[in-house]
Image (cartoon, grey):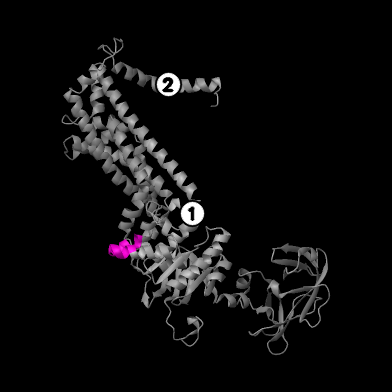
Amino acid sequence: MSSPEFAPWDDPSAQPLIQFKNVTKRFGSFTAIDDLAVDIYEREFFALLGASGCGKTTMMRMLAGFETPTSGQIMLAGQEIGAVPPNLRSVNMMFQSYALFPHLSVWDNIAFGLRRERMAKDLIKARVEEMLRLTRLEKFSGRKPHQISGGQRQRVALARSLAKAPKLLLLDEPLGALDKKLRQETQFELMDIQEKTGTTFVIVTHDQEEAMTVASRVAVMDEGQIIQIATPDKIYEAPNSVYVADFIGDVNIITGTARPNGAQQYDIHWSEGHAPLCAQSVSTFSDGQSCHLAIRPEEVLISAEKPENADNTMQGKVLDIAYLGNISTYHVELPNGTVVKAQIANTRRISRRAFTWEDPVWLSWAASAGVLLAK
Amino acid sequence: MIRMSWFNTVSLTLGFAFLYIPMLILILFSFNESKLVTVWAGFSTKWYKELFQNEAFLSAAWVTLKVAVLSSTFATVLGTMAALVLVRAGRFWGRTLFSGMIYAPLVMPEVITGLSLLLLFIGIGLDRGVLTIVLAHTTFAMCYVSVVVSSRLVSFDRSLEEAALDLGCTPLDAFRLVTLPIIAPAVISGWLLAFTLSLDDLVIASFTSGPAATTLPIKIFSAVRLGVSPEINALSTLMIAIVAVGVISASLVTKRQVLRRQRDVQAAQ
């Protein structure tokens, strides 16, 4: 391997495991998936992220075989699978509701898929026990699904879908039913299991934190189209549109017109009576083109005195303070009514806090802090 | 215990009296020594002994049982299939018409159902007997089965079937291994309902039965026209006993299952 980092999507010679080739899916007059093309590589942990109704579930159901594309092709390991029924695909799915068979024990649930393959009894036994070990469920093998807790059910569902060693595992909102603490633990378990088994995972979620935590790449979807596919850090630091910037994490969006000012430097005229903002951008904007400057709240500094040497400064007063324990978010109102969010890590006790409501403060950020977006 | 107000006590007593006094009288007089139904002459079980020597009653009972088992089984198969189509097939052409037609026999007067079946059997030259009663009972009981089963199917989580397909089942295997075991309680209660309906049907059976086969309700009805005998009281008491045992044991089993499930769920948390 040329690079130790796992990034087959940057390798032009890599063969994708799954290819969507101009796939469209319509339900009556509603277009759920609109001319979608995407490559997913082996051993990837690929996240489909989007608000409900964006088409992510339809995409997953087409991979599982429960829906067939209206047009276009879906390839799995070089073969067209668009019309292959679900029981003949080497793809397994973990359902959002877990869909555990209530009349069967944990053991029989996990063995269900293996029995359909008419595998020898001792092989089934060995495989089921391996799965029980992997998901730490040995003690519960004799129980029925209603006799175990939600977290354990989630692990049974995972074990059952992994038992047949599929080429591709689909996870439909796998952690949606768990409480926050259990969800975070389970995210790391999922990543661990994905690494151990080397299976390609495609996860559908509306929880951006979950997608960012587990995935090697994230696809942000909206209205049946993929808006951006990138690694979690790229999605966060270099979103390609206001939609993505706004969907992933917290962001300040300032809309204005761009005026080139040197190499990759732009002045953003955004409000009468305010000095233009200065921003760097790799993508080019023409003179007078409208643009959106996206700045993460943690990039905005807040201070009592006007900072020296800052690229952008503006004055305002504190409108609101959201205390989140480790960080605080300050909502600062500018004279023209715009509210800008600034985030500060709470390294000092709250009684020592420098600012309070109605305090006049200065905001500042570097020219390289924001991302300049055309749409 | 909470003491009931006098109003509640009176309504409860009146309600139950209204429901059960006729049956209690029937049971009481089945143990009457006298042949006269209205005169009490001491306790005796002799009518039960006579009942078990009455060939005509015994053969009618046997026919009734055969008809009930066969027709409720056929009705369960057909009714479940109809329920599956109506709940699952989505909006196919003529779906509303079909679902209306499935449920229409529920409100159709039995006399009309019976008469139309009689005309059909005469028309195709089918001799009336056990077969015709079975066919007739299957026809009207399958509607009830399909109502019971489809109400269970509506709340059935489709992803269970999808999971079965996903794990390598053919659609038929998915039904056999996952759907059927899960909806089994509804299918069984559909069968029981069909069985009971067939057991006590008089109208349709009297249209479709022939001299070769008489069911118990027809036998009782025609016997009563010649005068109520204590033998019939005894027979009716036995039927009440069988039904009561069935209902009570079924509810006990259900209650135990519910309790065990609650305990399990609590233990799992």
Residue at image location 39% in from the left, 36% down from the top: B252
Image location (x, y in percent) of residue B91: 40, 54
Q: Chain of mark 1?
A: A
Specify whether residue B225 is in view.
no
The part of the image, by quadrant, that contains residue B159 is: bottom left
Q: Secondary structure at mark 2?
A: helix
The disc at residue A295 is: none
Residue at image location 53% in from the left, 66% down from the top: A187
Of circles 1 and 2, which is in front? 1
Residue A209: say if magenta: no
Image location (x, y in percent) of residue B26: 32, 19
Q: Which residues are magenta?
A: A111-125
The part of the image, by quadrant, that contains residue A68 is: bottom left
Image location (x, y in percent) of residue B204: 27, 32
Image location (x, y in percent) of residue B93: 37, 54
Residue hosting label 1: A149
Q: Nearer the viewer, residue B86 or A78?
A: A78
Q: Chain of mark 2?
A: B
| Residue B50 left/right relative to B258 | left
The disc at residue B18 is: 2
- Picture layout, residue B170 above or below residue B220: below
Q: Nearer the viewer, residue A248 or A32?
A: A248
The part of the image, by quadrant, that contains residue B59 is: top left
Q: Amino acid at mark 1?
A: Ser
- Picture layout, residue A299 above or below residue A103: below
Q: Secondary structure at mark 1?
A: loop
